[in-house]
Amino acid sequence: MNVEITPEAEADLELAFQWYRHANPRLAFDFLRAVDERLQSTRRFPEAYAYVQAPVRRALVARFPFSLYFTREANRIVVLACLHHARDPESWRVRAPREGDSQGAEP
């Protein structure tokens, strides 16, 4: 299964990476590794993550206060957001498909 990261999620990741790079360059690369590990896990076992609102699931990033919000479609994972836990937990909703949208999302 392929993983697709939306431009909005890419921007989230870049912003977080830059913040960590400014604070501690090594920590920035640790953050990217942790995100990559979670992406690989969501690719292999997408159903292991709970729905926050169907069809969107949330995966916590190990060691860092971030969550990945994603949907599972027929042959791909689509990452909608990577948000810090201090941000509004509802902010991912504007990026999410609505339940029942016919874009190949899981039931």
Image (spheres, rainbow, N blue to C red):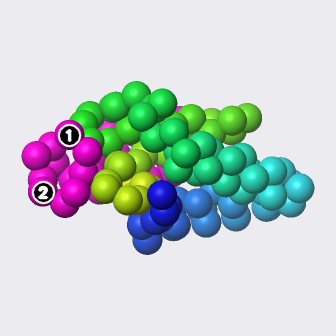
> Compared to 82, does 49 lie above or below?
above
Q: Is residue 55 magenta?
A: no
When asked about the image quadrant of residue 38, the answer is top right
Q: Dot 1 surroundings within 10 Å: few (below 14), some, or many (20 or more)?
A: few
**Does the CB distance between marks 1 and 2 fall below 8 Å?**
no
When asked about the image quadrant of residue 95, the answer is bottom left
**Residue 98 rendering spot, x and y as whole percentages:** 16, 48
Q: Which residues are magenta?
A: 81-107
Question: Three-letter amino acid code at disc 1?
Answer: Pro
Task: Name the side, left or right, on which 5 lies relative to 63.
Answer: left
**Residue 104 rendering spot, x and y as whole percentages:** 22, 57
* First in residue order: circle 1 vs circle 2: 2
Q: Is residue 83 magenta?
A: yes
Question: Three-letter amino acid code at disc 2?
Answer: Ser
**From this viewpoint, which residue is outermost toward the bottom?**
7
User: Who's the residue at 43% across and 45% down the image?
Assistant: 69
Look at mark 1 in the image and give the residue it sits on. 107
Look at mark 2 in the image and give the residue it sits on. 102
Between the C-alphas of marks 1 and 2, the distance is 10 Å
Task: Name the side, left or right, on which 100 lies relative to 42.
Answer: left
SS at badge 1:
loop
Q: Main secondary structure of the magenta part?
A: loop
Along the line of sight, which residue is nearer the eye, 37 or 84? Answer: 37
Q: Dot 2 surroundings within 10 Å: few (below 14), some, or many (20 or more)?
A: few
